[in-house]
Image: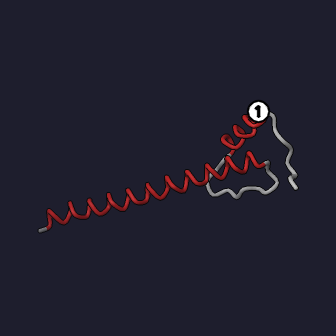
Amino acid sequence: MQIWRELKPEEVKEFTQWALDNWKPDTQINNVWHLVVRSTWGKLDEAFATAKRQIMADCKECRRRLHEFIESFEH
């Protein structure tokens, strides 16, 4: 049984835009939100998590290179 109504195409755009405008990292998805909002929010969460992992990996690599650079002057 589905508790959410079928949206018209213009409503899908509005609900998607609402999700885009109101999304914040680490905010739990509310189970009463329409599936369109929940799906959009989930995609944003996934994209954020991927970007965060990449940034952390890049930072780790930068720290490693900086350490190597500093060590090159010490020896």
- Residue 29 percent across, percent down from the top left: 72, 56
Identify the secondary structure beneath mark 1: helix
- Report the side of 38 relative to 57 (left or right): right
- How did the renderer colour the structure? secondary structure
- Report the side of 26 relative to 58 (left or right): right
- Residue 31 percent across, percent down from the top left: 79, 57
Q: Residue at x 75, y 37 (%)?
A: 12
- Residue 25 percent across, percent down from the top left: 61, 53
Q: Is residue 15 above or below residue 56?
A: above
Q: Which class describes the residues within 10 Å of circle 1: few (<14), some (14-19), or many (20+)?
A: few
- Report the side of 65 relative to 46 (left or right): left
Question: Which quarter shows the C terminus?
Answer: bottom left
Which residue, as the protein is rendered here, is positioned at the far front?
A: 1
Which residue, as the protein is rendered here, is positioned at the far top?
A: 10
Closer to the camera, 3 or 59?
A: 3
Which residue, as the protein is rendered here, is positioned at the far left?
A: 75
Question: Which quarter shows the N terminus?
Answer: bottom right
Q: State which quadrant residue 8 falls in.
A: top right
Count of marks placed on residues: 1
- Report the side of 4 relative to 72 (left or right): right
Name the residue type under label 1: Pro
User: Which residue is the site of mark 1?
Assistant: 9
Q: Residue at x 86, y 53 (%)?
A: 2
Q: Residue at x 73, y 46 (%)?
A: 37
Q: Residue at x 19, y 66 (%)?
A: 71
- Residue 68 percent across, percent down from the top left: 22, 63
